[in-house]
Image: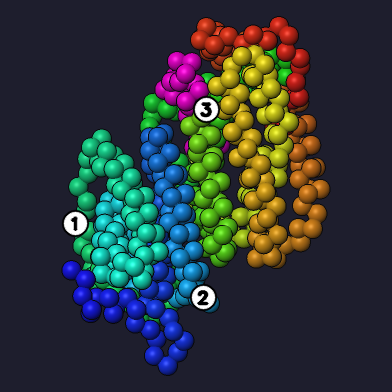
Amino acid sequence: MVTETTMARAVLVEPQSRMRPVTVYRLNEWQYVERTIQRLLAAWGRLVEEFYDKSAMHKFVWEQAECVRRLRERIDQFPGENRDLPVDHRLEALGNAVLLAPSVEDALDGIFSLLTGPLIVSYITYSRSVHGVHDAPTIAMLHEIVGIKEQQRLWFREYRRRRPHTTSQAYADAVGRALAACGNFAETLPVVTPAAPVGVNTDYRLPKLSARPERYLHRHNIVEWTSAKFTADVEMRRLFWCYGYLMEKNIPDDQLNWLWSAHFMPWEFQYDVARHLWDESRHGDSGASRLADFGISLEEIGFPNYGPQETGTLDVLTPAQLYEAVFFIGMVAETGHFTVKQEGYQDFRDGGDLESAEMMLFDIIDENAHVQYAHKWLPVIARHAGLDDSGYKERARQDREKHQANVKQRNAEMASKAPDDDYRFVQELLARMRKVKPLTNVATCPPRTPLPM
């Protein structure tokens, strides 16, 4: 029941100061907690094994960005308010208690149950306690966020059915104590010591190895053979892109460390990275989905990590290292692939494989946005790193030329290599794809541009 007392709690203002509803403090605390959840997903997401569970982690990173966006936009609707008011360090301590889990399964319990559950209760309690007319915009926004959380809850319930787990009691107790110190989100906390982003004051580091089930680790040399035949053979190009998009699922797991390391950057950068990350994850889903259309499973084609299979932990990226990561993905890899991707779209469309053409088209749309992110944020990161990036466009052009020269040399070496088991496996895949959806332009499709890298 809404009473005068509960309504008054929502509209109290600071004494001897400008008029500021307590709602503004609540919104800032909530956005800190939602940003904390995003950082927790970034911290533990690499240890989630299954392909489509990774998809869920990456989508949730984006959804957390959307929750924060809603909260920040609501703060903007209070004239002259600050979207980045300090919050008390007890919220940081709570986030760190969830972060420092003994295992990935405990961490998921911490994120989706021990932390998110009380947060949702605070949203619902607030919505029931404030005036339904006066603060209707906040209520409507909280309903949207609770709807997002409900979808996450349903995923986690299904995940726990597949992977039952009992939370460590010591861990649950530690989170419970930290939550109690925060008043269970029932009221705003007076700021005694401002909170830093979760994890900054811990020694937690992301794992180097992005987890995989063993059944995904089998690998044939698909990339080198399809790359070697890429220019002349449209069927090879189609297989290359299906597998290449599948392998892009590695990129968002790398970008989790961008988010973890970039706490010094404006929130808008983290928002753009979250979208970039989710886009790359969906590209991986596109490749897996298109391969499945041809009857090719992840177990038989493999989903290995990029690079060496190293254990240990990743260092937090310095601003200079973050600059290099964003530069390579945006200005070298993504910028360099526009020509070959546009040719792939045209060839698959003209060959009658509209599903593969659509896969190419939506990737091209996403990549245009990603390149714009790089142009937007590289100068900002450079200032944090103390770098002179005035010539970054020319440097990117030179780097793309070097990569293409390396590809041409590698393909020349492959041309003299005798067919092996990997080559025969590739030919088997081509035959299966041909049977499901033959390309009508195999004999007429002209040679195309070599891969840029």
Q: CA distance from mark 2 to mark 3?
A: 46 Å
What is the three-letter code of the residue carrying label 3?
Answer: Gly
Query: Which class describes the residues within 10 Å of circle 1: few (<14), some (14-19), or many (20+)?
Result: few
Tell me which residue sits at (45%, 44%) in the image: 58
- The disc placed on residue 287 is 3
> Quick check: 55 above or below 224?
below
| Left-right relation of 208 to 381 | left
Residue position marked by numbered label 1 in the rendering: 169
Please report whichever mark, 2 or 1, sits nearer to the chain's N-terminal start: 2
Q: Is residue 295 magenta?
A: yes
> Quick check: 407 above or below 159?
above
Residue position marked by numbered label 2 in the rendering: 79
- Residue 247 seen by the camera: no
The answer to whether the residue labelled 1 contacts the one labelled 3, judged by CB atoms less than 8 Å apart, is no
Q: Which residues are magenta?
A: 287-309
What is the three-letter code of the residue carrying label 1?
Answer: Gln
- The disc placed on residue 268 is none
- Residue 309 seen by the camera: yes
